[in-house]
Amino acid sequence: MRKFIIAAIALSLPTLAIADAATDAVKARQAHMKSYGKQMGTFAAMAKGEVEYDAAAAQAAADELGKLVMVDQSAFWLPGTSMDDLPGVSYAKPAFWSEMDKAGAIGKEMVAAVAAMQEVAGSGKGEMAQALGGIGKNCQACHKAYQAKKD
Ligand code: HEC
């Protein structure tokens, strides 16, 4: 019996290690997405007039977002980390993996929109607000297709 238990533990270890890696990948991408949200919040607050437009702060947020979108995300989007694989942890729809080219195309558009924001963030509130809309479109397009709502 003791032998059996030890063998069972030994067998389950690799599975646990894989589950950890999968959960870590999900946590990492969710944290990365939150950082996008933080920079977008800076623009949105200024665009809505909740915070006074500040060219330097807008530019800093744009440059930070520019860095974030350049991070290699391949390790974040491991296969086997959809909401079906990790319910309650992942909110990414399985379609993300079957339509990776489509999701990637949205991601590319977002990168271009962020570059456009970097050009104009410090030029004025109107320019910044317009660029914000350009980025937001891509966030929304991807979420609509591939992110499940969290309750
Ligand atoms: C290429 C697709 C794609 C793009 C582009 C994208 N997201 Fe996401 N986002 C996702 C997916 C998929 C999830 C769900 C991830 C999960 O739960 O595993 C997500 C989750 C999130 C979350 C929730 C994170 C959490 O704590 O669970 C936030 C916030 C977010 N995204 C913000 C943004 C913002 C802001 C942008 C635009 C600047 C953006 N995203 C662009 C696909 C995308």
Image (cartoon, rainbow, N blue to C red):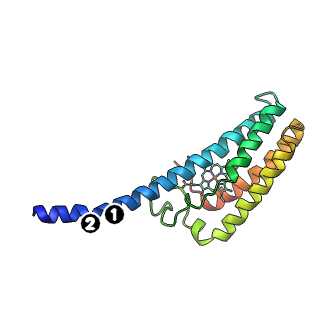
Based on the displayed image, in which of its 4 quarters is residue 7 positioned?
bottom left
Q: Amino acid at mark 2?
A: Leu
Residue 87 shows in the view: no
Q: Amino acid at mark 1?
A: Pro
Q: Residues within 10 Å of mark 1 (few under 14, many from 20)?
A: few
Spot occupied by residue 113 in the image (x, y as percentages of width and height): 80, 53
Spot occupied by residue 139 in the image (x, y as percentages of width and height): 70, 53
Seen at 77% across and 28% down, the residue is 51
Q: Secondary structure at mark 1?
A: helix
Q: Residues within 10 Å of mark 2 (few under 14, many from 20)?
A: few
The answer to the question of whether label 1 and label 2 lie on touching residues, with beta carbons closer than 8 A, is yes
Residue at far left of view? 1
Answer yes or no: disc 1 within 8 Å of ligand 1. no
| CA distance for labels 1 and 2 | 7 Å
Above or below, 66 against 100 in this view is above
Based on the displayed image, in which of its 4 quarters is residue 74 positioned?
bottom right
Q: Secondary structure at mark 2?
A: helix
Based on the displayed image, in which of its 4 quarters is residue 56 positioned?
top right
Numbered circle sitting on residue 60: none
Along the viewing direction, whichever of 42 and 15 lies nearer the viewer:
15
> Which residue position is annotated with label 1?
14
Spot occupied by residue 146 in the image (x, y as percentages of width and height): 61, 61
> Which residue position is annotated with label 2?
11
- Indicate left or right for 111 with 82 as reference: right
Which image quadrant: the N terminus?
bottom left
Residue 2 shows in the view: yes
- Indicate left or right for 34 with 19 as reference: right
